Amino acid sequence: MTINAVEEHYSKGGLLERILAALDAAGKDARALSPDDLAAVDEFHGGQRPATIRLAKLLAPCGKERVLDVGSGIGGPARFLASAYGCRVTGVDLCGEFCRVAETLTGLTGLQELVDFRQADALDLPFAEASFDIVWSQNSAMNIAERDRLYREMRRVLRAGGKLALQEIALGPGGEPHYPVAWAREPAISFLLTPEETRNKLEAARFGIVLWQDTSAATLASARARSPQKTGSPGAPARSPATPPALGTHLILGDDWQEMARNSVRNLEEGRVALFNAVLEALP
């Protein structure tokens, strides 16, 4: 597995143009956007905006913190933290296209004074020690094999007593996930750990557990609501139609978004994946 393989999975070209066209189709004025106008597409993780709100409530920032969002995607959570709490947020992502789109969307929402983005490898963060009060990360570690190094880097850039807020996908007891999923079309770029393994690695990186919350049930409910029903599935629960709204994460996922959505439901139902939120403190 190479960095290029992960970036290639997410980068398809033309993302900004697709989003702007979808905003227009949805009747949104791109010159006067709010973060809420983009929530259907820029909250690119399990549970979407409600999951971001849930993690932010667990973290409870006061608004004066300097935040680093690791795996920031096209910037939805970063803009939410800035607009809802007043935090100063820097996002880093491996995908250059995501960073460019994130910068443009941030400018369109008028949040460029509070939010910025840099293309960077999470295993080699381009910041000095103790640069941030909070490190925030939602559904980004599953593409990273060197999890020990990732958590050490997160700890390095946090001041002592600073907080790490995580939403992560973990390996469940039901076996390997069905592919494709949003973060991988094949196992080669998927590196899930169990919740217990994750917790052990975080503690080894000098983090103390403040809160740990299983969110699998809430994420399954959200995934079911968004997943298209497979044609001809007798007795299957009613799900959203195969044709998505103009604005949605399918703009990022690509043509196989329907199969990814169905696998998200199946993996959670069969216990192949689990999701959790955690708030941790950087220990001295």
Image (cartoon, grey):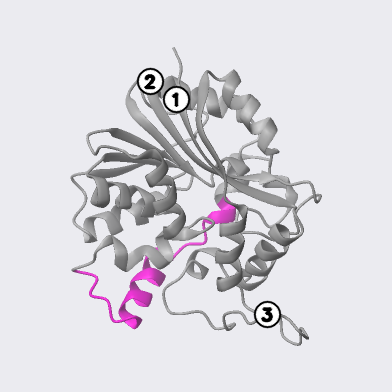
Q: Residue at point 74% right, 54% down?
A: 271
Q: Residue at point 69% right, 33% down?
A: 196
> Do tag 2 and tag 3 residues touch (Cβ < 8 Å)?
no
| Dot 2 amino acid type | Gly
Residue receiving disc 1: 281
Query: Magenta includes 41?
Result: no
Query: Looking at the rendering, in which quadrant would you find the C terminus?
Result: top left
Establish if 26 lies above or below 270: below
| Dot 3 amino acid type | Pro
Of residues 193 and 126, which is closer to you in this image? 193
Which numbered disc flags the more N-terminal residue, 2 or 3?
2
Residue 161: image tag: 2
Q: Residue at point 29% right, 81% down?
A: 27
Residue receiving disc 3: 237
Residue 87 x %, y %: 25, 40
Give the alpha-carbon distance from disc 2 to disc 1, as whole Å: 6 Å
Query: Magenta includes 14?
Result: yes
Give the alpha-carbon distance from disc 1 to disc 3, as whole Å: 41 Å
Residue lying farthest to the top in this orientation: 284
> Do tag 2 and tag 1 residues touch (Cβ < 8 Å)?
yes
In the image, the segment drawn in magenta is 8-31
Give the alpha-carbon distance from disc 2 to disc 3, as whole Å: 46 Å
